[in-house]
Image: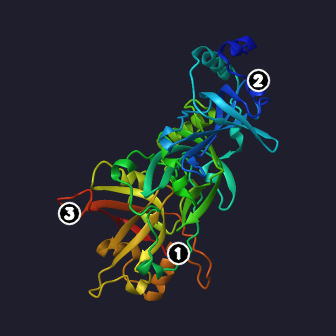
Amino acid sequence: MPILERDEYDDYKFLRIVDAMASINQKVNLIGVVIETGLPKKSKGTDCVWTLKIVDESHPSPGISVNVFAENFEKLPRVESAGDIVQLSHVVMKIHGSEVYALFNKKEQDKKLIAGLRKWTISRQHETALSDSLSLKEIKEGHRFNLTCKVLHICEVKEGEWMLFVWDGTDAPPLNVHTKLDDEVENPLPLQLEASPLSRDVLCTFPSVGTVLRMTAEQCNEKLGLHILKAGRWVQFRNINFKVHSGLWCGILQPFSKFSYLPKNDNLVLQCQRAYDERVKRKWDRMPLSSFPWPSHITDTDYPDVPFVTLMDILSYPEVTAKFRCVVRVLATFPGQPSNFRAPCGTYRLRLTLEDPTTRLHAFLYAEDAVKFFGGYPSLYKMIRLQNALLGVKEGAKKPRNPPWIQCCLKSYYVDKTNVWGSRKYRIFGTQLID
């Protein structure tokens, strides 16, 4: 392992971290390797602060924290990945309790020292332990976890409130449904947590398999600089919570949460990408992982040999009109009661809220397609029984619903020739409930 000699530091007036830690209340110059960062946030004053943890060969573990202050989020330093080199000059060394930390003032440059430190970085293992990271398929509500994922998109959902969309190629666990059927009239299950759906251009950049998790800050969102994170980068988040909102998983960032960018050749990143690539190539692997080895047998379709696609495949399909076969859960019906499924003229007309691990959408059951679906015009008693099976309702029980995975065929269509994409709808066809 190449080591920088002490006289090199003296020539350039940069201290090793171990020496800087002994210089309490003094101004020193430091160069180190970033191993972890906190989330940028508003300080108690008018500026912003970002906490970095850095190491060098004199103090490779656990590192030293550096609080970097700037006038606004945009003026904070940009850290591209764990392993980046940061230069700090006129840093004031402080101590709080037993912990030594540094306050950053401004920076200089020292190319020779940086080159030596970069060689040392390459020769050492990245010390952030990735083995304790969860995948999205393992998340649980109310626990604090580490998560390694790719940031797909960042958007401002309200003024000063930002939301991340992250993914790792796995499916988050399906959730029970707690809403009542009659709630669909006044308070229907949302298709997304943000106020308005993402544009088609954004959706087309999302992977077609695996859960896209929404991540936000539950409190003081406007004080966290989430918008300076970079879309398209793999990140390890530390100390985040998971909660359920409207039956959708949501990651919750806290002021004490940390993150590190990961390089594209990181072993865990390569593993996630390889698993995704293999999954999308196989004929039947676009089914939800929790539906294996096969979805429930309460439905059948007219096209048993057509491979399944995901709902994200459907939303991002390049043509407006098309036909698909998929595996979904039916979360709700509108109207909620089977007695209202037919118009006064006798024609079926209802809307189903469908979900798979990738997204949700509304699909209509209408006229002859609904006649096929329900097997004609069954009695109200039988219709209630069919709906209960479809929605996972246990007769006589008030427990949350757990809808089964079913297979169905969907076709997309438009209702306005002047705005075909904006008026695109979805309808179930070629599918029947099996009593």
Residue 308 seen in this snapshot? no
**What residue would you read off at disc 1?**
389
Asked which secondary structure carries label 2, the reply is loop
Kindly report the distance in space between the C-alpha atoms of the residues bearing marks 3 and 1: 35 Å
Residue type of the residue flagged with mark 1: Ala
- Comparing 199 with 296, the one in front is 199
Q: Nearer the viewer, mark 2 or mark 3?
A: 2
How was the colour assigned to the protein in this rendering? rainbow
- Comparing 61 with 295, the one in front is 61
Kindly report the distance in space between the C-alpha atoms of the residues bearing marks 1 and 2: 64 Å
What x and y, as percent, mark residue 180? 52, 80
Mark 3 surroundings: few (<14), some (14-19) or many (≥20) residues within 10 A: few
Kindly report the distance in space between the C-alpha atoms of the residues bearing marks 2 and 3: 68 Å
State the residue at coordinates (64%, 32%): 34
Which numbered tag is attached to residue 416? 3
**What residue would you read off at disc 2?**
58
Which numbered tag is attached to residue 302? none
